[in-house]
Image: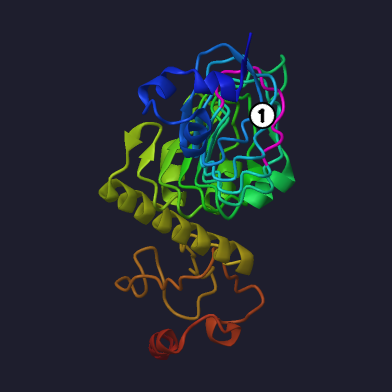
Amino acid sequence: MVRLTVDLIGRSKNRLKSKRNLSVQHYLKKLTHLNFSNRHIDHIDDLSMCRNLTVLYLYDNQITRICNLNFASNLTHLYLQNNKITHIENLSCLQKLSKLFLGGNSITLVEGLEQLRELKELHIEGQRLPPGEKLVFDPRTVHSLSESLCVLNINNNNIDEILDLVVLNKLTHLYAADNQLWDIQELETVFSQWPQLHRMDLRGNPVCHKPKYRDRLITICRRLEELDGKEITELSRQFLINWKASKDAKKKITDGRNMTGQISYPFSADFRLGPEHPFPYNSAGFLGKRKPLWFGRPTMKMSMENHEDPLSAGLITDIQETKVQSHMAL
């Protein structure tokens, strides 16, 4: 295995390509980008002479621990994908770090990022997890990143819920494909708190098979431009928003009626009187010509057994009363 040292850096091809009259010390001091990817590196030695380093490429190596980076106060990009790292540690001094790439390691807990106030991108996809385990987040780290993190890549980490991430309200890009997300209502709750979300990939999750999955997320994420690799047009978004508004309005009306006890009844009431009519009536109608009166109240029949006519019973309106009285006068 290979240790990354200043001596190794000084003997690199990049050093030989630079001006030969530069001393190793001066070269290391001026160095801003360092690429030692896929070089069988298993340990990071003291690199404090590279104090102006801004970008460090160490992906595709055999590194087991993040260490000896306290000097790199100017570092903005750190690439550590596909190593053998098990813990996120020793990064608190990287105050200017904006992009951190940790995919393809063996990390089970996202932690130790509380001091990275400038971190905008966190890529921690495809961790090599023990069977049955999932990637989880330390609440302290999540809260500390809530005001800065814009891009989060958690693809393929056996994650089944993201409610703990709801505070990340600056997110513009979420990559959470090939996980175990299944609760559409939880996703709606979380995404409603991410007003700046532009791109999202949830392919390969059980939730993708839920009815109206795509429609529901588009109406929640008003700025979403791409979902699962497919573009969202403004026309389709507005159609779905209008459809949801109409559906919600109808539901509100229905719920209001149920709460106030307003139930619709069929208006087929029959107030045709029994055999003791106070005025002529037969099956053809009143006086053989007029049609029977229909009063439009819930179904009930009025009997004359109590010798109470429609007027005294209070079941006939003023206009109907005039008609009845005219018949009774005949």
Q: Main secondary structure of the magenta part?
A: loop
Residue in the image at 36% along x and 39% along y: 226
The quarter in which the C terminus is drawn is bottom left
Q: Is residue 56 above or below residue 253?
A: above
Q: Is residue 249 magenta?
A: no
Q: Residue furthest front?
A: 21
* Colour scheme: rainbow
Q: Residue 256's x, y, as percent? A: 56, 66
* Quarter of the rendering containing residue 93: top right
The quarter in which the N terminus is drawn is top right
Q: Residue 222's x, y, as percent? A: 41, 53
Q: Residues within 10 Å of mark 1 (few under 14, many from 20)?
A: some
Q: Is residue 202 above or below residue 43?
A: below
Judging depth in this view, the residue of 45 and 317 nearest the camera is 45
Residue type (three-letter) at the residue carrying disc 1: Asp
Q: Residue 135's x, y, as percent? A: 67, 28
Residue in the image at 35% along x and 44% along y: 225
**In this rendering, position of residue 40 left or right of residue 108:** left
* Quarter of the rendering containing residue 200: top left
- On the image, numbered disc 1 is attached to which residue? 46
Magenta stretch bounds: 80-91
Q: Is residue 264 visible?
A: no
Q: Residue furthest top?
A: 1
Residue in the image at 59% along x and 40% along y: 72
Q: Residue 128's x, y, as percent? A: 64, 17
Judging depth in this view, the residue of 142 and 118 nearest the camera is 118
Q: Is residue 293 visible?
A: yes
**In this rendering, position of residue 223 left or right of residue 78:** left
* Element carrying mark 1: loop
